[in-house]
Image (cartoon, rainbow, N blue to C red):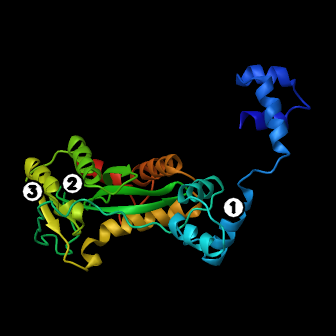
Amino acid sequence: MKYLVIFRHKEKYSVTVMCNFFEVSRSGYYDFIKRMDKPAFDEPLAEKIAECQRLTNKTYGYRRVHIWLERQGVHHNPKTVLRVMNKYGLLSEIRRRRKYKYMSQQLHRYENLLNRDFYADKPNRKWVTDISYIHTGQGVLYLSAIRDLYDNSIVAYKTASEQTVNLVLNTVRAAKQKEAVTAELQLHSDQGFQYTSHGYFNLTKEYHITPSMSRRGNCYDNAPAENFFGILKSECINRQKIKDFAMAKSLIDEYIYFYNNERIQIKTKLTPLEQRRRYC
């Protein structure tokens, strides 16, 4: 990459000066120039693999590509096929779902205490929580958030590149550090494996939080959590192409600050935190 930058600016700057700046050798740069005019030895194989991926809509992994090549009379080691696929961006776009390692955990189920009663007369009495998916050019970023039904504020949120129990536990811990939690607090969730885990059971018990859980297949039981994610995506996430996790996290941070502190709610004509301060 450094040699390519030097090549592109060779008419403007001295090659020697640029080599010194990038801490590369002049001989290495000129070897790079010589190689630029020579086709890569693995280009013919890459072209055949590209043909295979065009025909299969880029669904073949390297093992199937290797078999397809052999049927075409092209014989290479499977590891060579994988290396070339990596080099030329010819990997399959199909990925197997991760197998989450939670089957051995003890499963805990809770009653639907909230029962779609989404009214709270004071802060920290009814919280709802869920996880949403933020698609980026780097992959999927998972967002865990807790929303207080008193003022609809986001009490705490965490992001991670993997959907794990710890993502949920860290969100609950962050909320506990921020807010005064009593035994009167209900924390409502769906039946995702994070919320039925033994770790979630222990943490809510330690914090004297009463878990509540939606009925299976009833997304409306946790509608306020889904509603916030819908607002976030329509007003922020879906309005631009997110290239990586860093960009997604920055957008989430900025939007949740705006949502809590500046976004006026039609029903109350206040921002969530204005409403919260009025109670205090």
Q: Residue at coordinates 79% horizontally, 36% vertically from top-left?
A: 32
> In this orientation, which residue lies closer to the viewer: 102 or 211?
102
Asked if the residue under mark 1 is in contact with the one under mark 2, i.e. CB atoms within 8 Å, the reply is no
Given residues 174 and 97, the one toward you in this image is 97
Q: Nearer the viewer, residue 235 or 168?
A: 168
Which amino acid type is marked by label 1?
Leu
Q: Please provide percent x and percent y for residue 28.
A: 76, 28
Q: Quadrant of residue 227?
A: bottom left
Q: Which of label 1 and label 3 is nearer to you?
A: 1
The residue at which mark 3 appears reads as 184
Q: x, y percentage for residue 239?
A: 58, 63
**Quadrant, the N terminus:** top right
**20 is higher (above) or lower (below) than 86:** above
- Where is residue 100? Give x, y as percent: 28, 61
Mark 3, secondary structure of its residue? loop
- Left or right? Give the position of 156 relative to 179: right
117 in relation to 268, above or below: below
Task: Please state which amino acid type lies under the numbered disc 3.
Answer: Glu
| Precedes in sequence: disc 1 or disc 3 | 1
Dot placed on the residue nearer the N-terminal end, 2 or 3:
2
Near mark 2 (Cα within 10 A), the count class, few <14, some 14-19 or many ≥20, is many
Q: Amino acid at mark 2?
A: Pro
Asked whether residue 127 appears in the rendered view, the answer is: no
For label 1, the residue is: 45
Q: Earlier in the sequence, mark 2 or mark 1?
A: 1
Real-space Cα distance between discs 1 and 3?
Answer: 66 Å
Residue in front for this viewpoint, 15 or 195: 15
Dot label at residue 123: 2
